[in-house]
Structure formats: C-alpha cells, structure tokens
Image: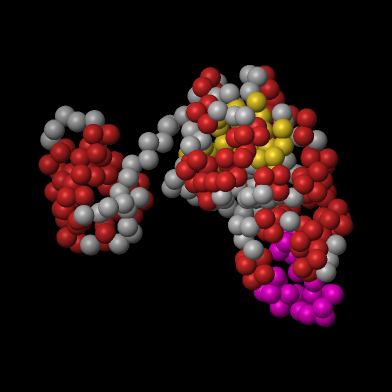
C-alpha cells in the first residue's frame, strides 16, 4: 500500500508534497536511496503519517535538506467549527472573465484607438505597465488607471457590465451560510467603485455582514498588514475562520497571519482551465461545499 502511494505520486509530486527543492529527487543516487527506504519500511506495521515523518528525517540526515516541511492540511473543513467566512470577490465568487476581457481586450483596444497604435503594440505596452504595479494598491485602483492611461475606466466598465456573472452555486452557498448563522465578509482588493458596480449587477451584497476593500485598510491582501487591520475591523477569530480565494499568494499571506481554514478556488474564469495548487485544499465549484462537513 505504501509503495503504491509513494510511487503513484511520482518523484515530482512526492517532492511537491514535501515542499523541498525541485532538483533533489532527480538525482539518481537519491532516487535509489528512496527506493531502499520505502522497501525497508514496507515490511513494518506503520501508519502513513509516521512513515512520512521518518522519510523526512531520512532526507534531513542524508542530504541536509533544510526546508522540507509537511503541511498538516485537513481533508475537510467542518462547518460546525467555523463562525466566520471570508470570501474574495473576483475569480472566487464572480467569474474572472469580465476582468480578463476588460483589461486584456477592451482597454488595449481603446488605448490603441486613442494613441493610433496597433492592438498588439498597445496590449504589449499595457501588460508591462500592469505588471509594474502588481501587488500594489494601484493594481486595482481604477482612478489611478484612468489618470495613467487617459481613459475613463469606470465608464468603460459600465459598458460591458453585462459580462459580470456570479459563479455557479455561489448564491446557494451564501444562503447555506446564512442558514447556519455564519458571519460572512467580502474581502477584496477591488476598488470600491468596482465593488459597487459588481454588487449592484449581481445583487449578492445582501448576503454579507460587511465588505472590506484593500483601499479601506491601505494594503492589498498580499500583505500581512492587511490581515492585521482586517481582523480589527471585522472582529473575526482566526481559529474559527474560513477564507476562500483564487490567488495563492493571498492565501499564503492569510496562512502566515494565522487564519486556520483556507481554500483555493481553482476555476476563476469560466473561459480558462482550472488552476492548480500544491499548498491548499482546492475547490472548483461551490457545489462541493454544499453539505454539512464542507
């Protein structure tokens, strides 16, 4: 059983599971020693967690790998243990296709028209400009982008608001949380003007006890300072909180801050393949959470 488990994972997946350096398991000597290790411990009555701990100790001893860790990720998230639910907006509750189309097609199109450029040249320039502001408040500040690009970003968003859509089963999930008397908070990096537009279009604002934008606290969610201020403002208990987001960097920061229950929303856009995560429990659809155990 253990042999099948370890080798069905494959060396690369096994490596990812342990969060160690990517090159070490491609070393033939290490691969050979791992095989010997597994065959030796297969003969002994031992549970899988203990086997993994022994395996880690083996790697430490043989190769002085310093950053090998096992993340104790729960298999399920018990609803009864959760009092607060924090939810990201774009990509998590709402289809990211609206934002992808807006910033990847409409804005380059309008910028090209304004500056007499080809669409391709405008898109290349804009994507480099976007990238330079990634993980800052400017990234989602539509007033900043209006000034930077000399385009009326709020007006352009209004023009395609028909593309704003709620992901499947989100409403049912929010109703279930309400039924179980959970505190529900929307936490987003989106500018408050964008939040207002999307909540008006989708009518999901009524399900939230509070809405918190990164602009309210002065930091995007990728910074631990956001979470310090968010906890003070929303008054949630980290040990009884579930947070769902479609961005791993945000979830990693929330984990660093100490939020206990974390889920990665894999299908952010209905037009793209689901993303993968090696660090968090994954959901593709909110239907997966529609039962007592979450």
Viewer-closest of 52 and 224? 224
For the point 77% across and 57% down, which residue is it?
142
**Stretch of the chain drawn in magenta:** 101-127
Please report the residue visible at 70 percent of the width from the left and 70 percent of the height from the top. 126
Q: Is residue 223 left or right of residue 173?
A: left
Residue 277: image x %, image y %? 48, 48
Question: Residue 13 appears at what percent x and percent y?
Answer: 35, 50
Quarter the C terminus occupies: top right
Chief SS of the magenta region: helix
- Residue 92 vs 153, above or below: the answer is above
Instruction: Find out whether residue 167 is within the magenta segment.
Output: no
Q: Position of residue 143 (x, y in %)?
A: 79, 58
- Can I make out residue 228 in this image? yes
Q: Quadrant of the N terminus?
A: top left
Residue 267 visible here:
no
Image: 202 above or below 163: above
Question: Looking at this view, is 3 or 148 the one in front?
Answer: 148
Q: Nearer the viewer, residue 52 or 38?
A: 52
Which residue is found at the position 64% from the left and 63% from the top? 133
């Amino acid at each position: 059983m253990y042999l099948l488990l370890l080798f069905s994972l494959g060396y690369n997946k096994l490596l990812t599971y342990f969060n160690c350096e990517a090159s070490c398991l491609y070393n033939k000597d290490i691969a050979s020693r791992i095989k010997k290790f597994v065959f030796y411990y297969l003969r002994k009555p031992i549970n899988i967690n203990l086997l993994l701990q022994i395996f880690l100790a083996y790697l430490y001893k043989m190769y002085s790998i310093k950053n090998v860790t096992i993340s104790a990720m729960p298999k399920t998230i018990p609803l009864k243990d959760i009092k607060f639910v924090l939810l990201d907006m774009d990509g998590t509750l709402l289809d990211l296709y609206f934002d992808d189309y807006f910033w990847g097609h409409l804005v380059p199109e309008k910028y090209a028209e304004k500056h007499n450029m080809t669409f391709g040249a405008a898109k290349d320039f804009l994507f480099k400009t976007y990238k330079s502001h990634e993980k800052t408040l400017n990234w989602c500040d539509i007033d900043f982008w209006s000034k930077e690009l000399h385009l009326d970003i709020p007006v352009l968003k209004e023009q395609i608001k028909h593309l704003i859509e709620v992901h499947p089963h989100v409403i049912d999930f929010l109703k279930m949380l309400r039924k179980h008397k959970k505190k529900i908070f929307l936490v987003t990096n989106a500018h408050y003007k964008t939040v207002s537009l999307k909540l008006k279009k989708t009518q999901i604002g009524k399900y939230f006890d509070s809405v918190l934008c990164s602009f309210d606290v002065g930091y995007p969610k990728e910074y631990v300072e956001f979470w310090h201020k968010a906890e003070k403002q929303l008054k949630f208990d980290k040990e009884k909180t579930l947070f769902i987001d479609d961005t791993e960097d945000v979830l990693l920061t929330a984990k660093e801050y100490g939020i206990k229950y974390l889920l990665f929303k894999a299908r952010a856009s209905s037009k793209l393949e689901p993303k993968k995560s090696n660090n968090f429990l994954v959901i593709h659809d909110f239907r997966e959470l529609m039962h007592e155990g979450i």
